[in-house]
Image: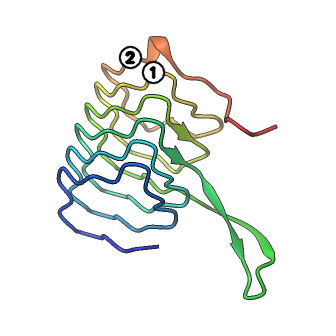
Amino acid sequence: GACFDKCILRGALFVDTILAMCSMRDADMKKVRMNGAVMDGVRMANSDCSEAIFQGVKFGGIDQRDKKGAKTGTMWRADLTNTNFEQADLRNSVFDEAQMKGANLTKANVAGVAFGDTDLSDVELEGANVGLVLNGNIPGRR
């Protein structure tokens, strides 16, 4: 995937974009619009995504493959460690076992979000509308 590490992407438009395995570490992503983007295996550690729109985004995993294309049994999960989603719109997004240690979802709109088996133990959810949400089911998973 593309590398946007430490880039200023403030207000950028990535609607319905495939950003699988993209690296966006330490990026300024305030107010970006990523509605419907596919972000499986994305690396966004320490990025500022405050007031951004991530409606319907999938933060899932990608199977690692060897040089012949066979699955190795290792899954590359989305890395959202220490990412700031303060006041972000995350409605109907899917977090499929994403790494979220230290993520900030203060006052984020998480209505209809599926967190599945994602570890939320170090995630800040103060002021988020968690009373409406937290669907444990990952769409398409049996």
**Residue 2 occupies which quadrant of the picture?**
bottom left
**Residue 67 higher or lower than 126, as above or below:** below
Q: Is residue 133 left or right of residue 104?
A: right
Give percent across and percent down for residue 108.
Answer: 32, 28
- Residue located farthest toward the top when viewing the structure as drawn: 131
Q: Secondary structure at mark 2?
A: loop
| CB atoms of marks 1 and 2 within 8 Å | yes
Q: Secondary structure at mark 1?
A: loop
Residue at 47% across / 57% down in the picture? 79
Indicate the amino acid at tag 1: Ala
Residue at 48% across / 59% down in the picture? 18
- Residue located farthest toward the front when viewing the structure as drawn: 16
Quadrant showing the C terminus? top right
Give percent across and percent down for residue 58.
Answer: 53, 45
Give percent across and percent down for residue 88.
Answer: 30, 34
Disc 1: which residue: 111
Residue at 54% across / 22% down in the picture? 134
Indicate the amino acid at tag 2: Asn
Residue situated in front as seen by the camera: 17 or 25 = 17
Disc 2: which residue: 129
Residue situated in front as seen by the camera: 76 or 2 = 2
Crowd band around label 2 with a 10 angstrom C-alpha radius: few (<14), some (14–19), many (20+): some
